[in-house]
Image: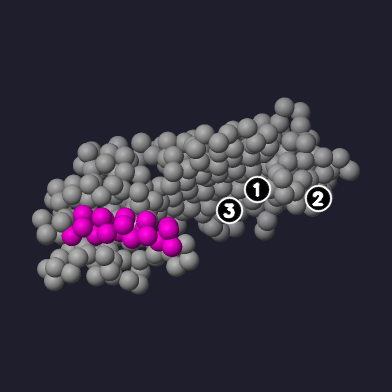
């Protein structure tokens, strides 16, 4: 697990040992004086074991100041961000935000723009409950990257990896994974180009035994028996089927996915699947042309799901959360065969 970061003045020193709440401290202590970072001490079991003059971002001579010294300008709609200045000039350097005695956020700022940001939020027990990282491309030539990881009782419960493409090469993507207490994925949202967001863990010190989405898929029984998948592309879903990663699934929810109708027939081969819930968007009310196209798609999907149910022991529902799409789009003679 990533080390907690604390202000040095929050620790109690006893005979060269550092304590937090009467417990020998483990983590990093930031010594900032007169609103500038002076030193960062690495502390193990209360003893200083190392030190450096920068935080997460290696300094290379940059100024290192408290966030409170920066002045925020007006929101820049072209850059979709706020520009920061220091002593009347756009700020270039490192700055640190402290909250309730802990180091909460570290920024690398170039010409007034935060290009890299790392935030860590402690849970009160000396462990990190949330980690965030942002890498902003101020040139808008490649793209922005973001990560979010959350823990509960020292178990990773959520990971998000996002990439916003500026180069118009259609590589924008978003992966959100939610884990149960058994460290299995219970819900996965996989939008657009998942390859560009497959790096799930941007640092080596976050205490996880995987780095990428492929690393996760190499694990045994990585998916929970009750699994919800949103927005997945057909090619990736077929990979999961080909590798047998869904063989233990008993309940499967597919929401707003881009799965081909012919792929649904493959679900009959899943040995444990008992129920399948398919959810799609409601039919357009205003755009009649788009609504007609939707209806044709849902008719084809309803037929594919009906065939799957007839050829398997899988109980299937198909709706938008309100309207039963089997009743809405199947021919009358097939509706009568529904049980």
- Dividing the picture into quarters, in which one does residue 207 lie? top left
Is residue 193 shown left or right of residue 268? right
User: Picture coordinates of residue 172 (x, y %)?
Assistant: 50, 41
Taking depth in this image into account, of 181 and 27 the one nearest to the observer is: 181
- Tell me the magenta residue range: 288-306
Q: Which residue is mark 3?
A: 121
User: Picture coordinates of residue 191 (x, y %)?
Assistant: 43, 47
User: Picture coordinates of residue 337 (x, y %)?
Assistant: 12, 68
- Which residue is painted at 42% across and 36% down in the image? 195
Taking depth in this image into account, of 215 and 42 the one nearest to the observer is: 215
Query: In this picture, is 219 found above or below 153?
Result: above
Is residue 234 shown left or right of residue 116? left
Is 296 covered by the magenta stretch?
yes
Around disc 3, counting alpha carbons within 10 Å, would you say few (fewer than 14), some (14 to 19), or many (20 or more)? some
Q: Callout 2: helix, strand or loop?
A: strand
- Mark closest to the chain's N terminus, 1 or 3: 1
- Which residue is painted at 44% across and 43% down in the image? 192
- Distance from disc 3 to disc 2, alpha carbons, whole Å, reads 26 Å
Q: Which mark is residue 105?
A: 1
Q: Which residue is mark 2?
A: 73
- Which residue is painted at 39% across and 51% down in the image? 231
Single out the mark in the foreground, 3 or 2.
Answer: 2
Is 194 covered by the magenta stretch?
no
Tell me the quarter of the image containing the C terminus.
Answer: bottom left
* Prevailing secondary structure of the magenta residues: helix
Around disc 1, counting alpha carbons within 10 Å, would you say few (fewer than 14), some (14 to 19), or many (20 or more)? many
| Mark 1 vs 3: CB contact within 8 A | no
Q: Callout 3: helix, strand or loop?
A: strand
């Amino acid at each position: 697990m990533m080390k907690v970061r604390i202000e040095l003045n929050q620790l109690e020193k006893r005979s060269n040992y550092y304590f937090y709440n009467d417990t020998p401290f483990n983590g990093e202590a930031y010594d900032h004086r007169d609103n500038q970072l002076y030193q960062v001490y690495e502390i193990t079991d209360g003893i200083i074991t190392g030190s450096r003059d920068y935080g997460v971002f290696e300094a290379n001579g940059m100024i290192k100041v408290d966030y409170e010294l920066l002045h925020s300008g007006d929101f820049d709609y072209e850059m979709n961000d706020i520009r920061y200045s220091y002593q009347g000039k756009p700020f270039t350097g490192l700055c640190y935000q402290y909250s309730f005695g802990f180091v909460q956020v570290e920024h690398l700022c170039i010409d007034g723009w935060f290009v890299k940001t790392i935030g860590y939020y402690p849970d009160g027990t000396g462990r990190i409950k949330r980690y965030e990282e942002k890498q902003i491309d101020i040139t808008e030539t490649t793209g922005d990257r973001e990560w979010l990881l959350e823990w509960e009782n020292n178990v990773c419960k959520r990971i998000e990896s996002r990439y916003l493409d500026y180069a118009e090469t259609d590589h924008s993507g978003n992966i959100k994974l939610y884990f149960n207490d058994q460290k299995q994925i219970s819900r996965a949202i996989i939008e657009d180009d998942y390859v560009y967001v497959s790096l799930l863990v941007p640092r080596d010190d976050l205490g996880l035994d995987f780095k990428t989405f492929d690393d996760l898929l190499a694990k045994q029984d990585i998916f929970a028996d009750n699994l919800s998948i949103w927005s997945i592309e057909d090619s990736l879903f077929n990979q999961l089927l080909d590798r047998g990663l869904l063989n233990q699934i008993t309940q499967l929810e597919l929401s707003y996915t881009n799965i081909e109708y012919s792929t649904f027939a493959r679900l009959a081969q899943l040995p444990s699947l008992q129920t399948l819930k398919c959810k799609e968007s409601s039919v357009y009310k205003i755009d009649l042309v788009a609504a007609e196209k939707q209806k044709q798609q849902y008719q084809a999907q309803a037929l594919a799901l009906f065939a799957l149910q007839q050829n398997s022991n899988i109980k299937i529902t198909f709706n938008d959360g309100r309207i039963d799409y089997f009743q809405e789009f199947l021919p009358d003679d097939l509706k009568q065969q529904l049980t």
